[in-house]
Image (cartoon, rainbow, N blue to C red):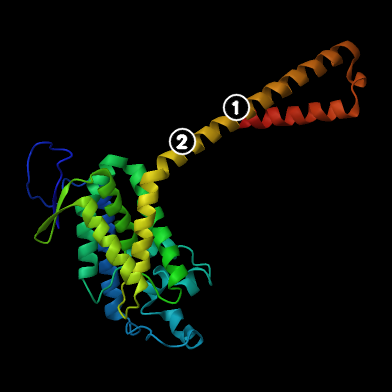
Amino acid sequence: MTYNNSYYKPGSGFGLSIGSRWTRAIMILIIVNVSVFVVQLLFSTISPQWDGVSPGIDIDDMIPQLILGPDRFTTIFWLYRPLAIGKLWLWQFVTYMFLHSVSSPWHIIFNMLVLWMFGSEVERAMGTSKFLTMYFSAGIFAGIFCCLFTPDSPIIGASGAIFAVEVAFAMFFPNTTVVFFIFPIKAKYLVMIFAGITVISCIMPSSGNTAYFAHLGGLIYGFLFIRYESRCSGFLLSWQKQQQEKEYKKEENIKRQVDVLLDKVNLGGMKSLTRRERNFLRSASKRYRKTRDK
């Protein structure tokens, strides 16, 4: 796939280019993915367990093999629900995104190519911090989504997060021309095609190893993130502001009450205070010391 980004070059006409200048986050993500893939190759070469677990075996019979898995490195870092949830290996919801199939190099090649092509423009549009938030949260959501519908299948690959990036690109630059193999097509239509294929693949049973539900989860999350993230951020900022105002009013109220009690002490001494008033002064004093020490 190639694309011509007419959003940044209005009136430039149709043209072909592969990707664009790398942004820092995209470069780091690709380097980390490729580095992890090299480590996987090393482990798959030296591990006698690489043949893995055959499909169709009863879960109880698989337990001894699951401890080792295809190899120790993959077992620790792929996403497999009996381990991620059953053994609370929660890091797998993040680390699985950096693993790819060593038996099919096209898995990582295609994922990194798509990330390179679309990711930089999306990162520029969103900003690095927000882009990385979307990327990793989309990957986590895609993993959870896949675990719900295919709980007995291990998951590897960055596809869920990358599908979210594709959706984001299509929403930011819907009329950008993308050349899919040799066919020019607008980004919004290409993503619609991908979404249709993904939904059909999820509905129809398949004997392949592709995690279509992770793809679907990434598509859904990417759409929701781009559409509603700004509203959620605005709501959170508004809520934080309200909480700060409440805290400020509370502090002012405490200060006024303390001033009244101190005036009372000046006139009649500590004996003029009730037990409740003395306790209030002690609590206010402790609260003031904690605030001052922060």
State the residue in front, 4 or 45: 4
Question: What residue sits right under mark 1 in the picture?
Answer: 245
Residue 289 left/right relative to 180? right
The mark total stands at 2
**x then y, percent, for residue 67:** 46, 80
Q: Quadrant of residue 112?
A: bottom left
**Which residue occupies 66% across, 32% down?**
290
Q: Residue at x 68, y 29 (%)?
A: 289
How far apart are labels 2 and 1 at the CA level? 16 Å
Position of 259 relative to 84 (above/below): above
**Three-letter amino acid code at disc 2?**
Gly
Residue 189: image quadrant is bottom left
The amino acid type found where label 1 is placed reads: Glu
104 relative position to 48: left or right: left
Q: Residues within 10 Å of mark 2 (few under 14, many from 20)?
A: few
Q: Quadrant of the C terminus?
A: top right
What residue sits 85% from the left and 12% below the top? 266
Up/down of 6 relative to 74, above or below: above
Q: Position of residue 186 (x, y in %)?
A: 18, 51
Q: Residue at label 2?
A: 234
Q: Nearer the viewer, mark 2 or mark 1?
A: 2
- Would you say 77 lies left or right of 165 here? right
Q: Position of residue 129 (x, y in %)?
A: 36, 43
Instruction: Kindly give the residue lying farthest to the right in the view shown.
Output: 271
Q: Nearer the viewer, residue 263 or 86?
A: 86
Q: Quadrant of the N terminus?
A: bottom left
Q: Report if the CB atoms under discs 2 and 1 are less than 8 Å apart.
A: no
Q: Residues within 10 Å of mark 1 (few under 14, many from 20)?
A: few
Q: In the image, residue 228 lies at what x, y percent?
A: 41, 44
Horizontally, residue 1 falls left or right of residue 138, namely: left
The secondary element bearing badge 1 is classed as helix
Regarding mark 2 in the picture, which secondary structure is present there? Answer: helix
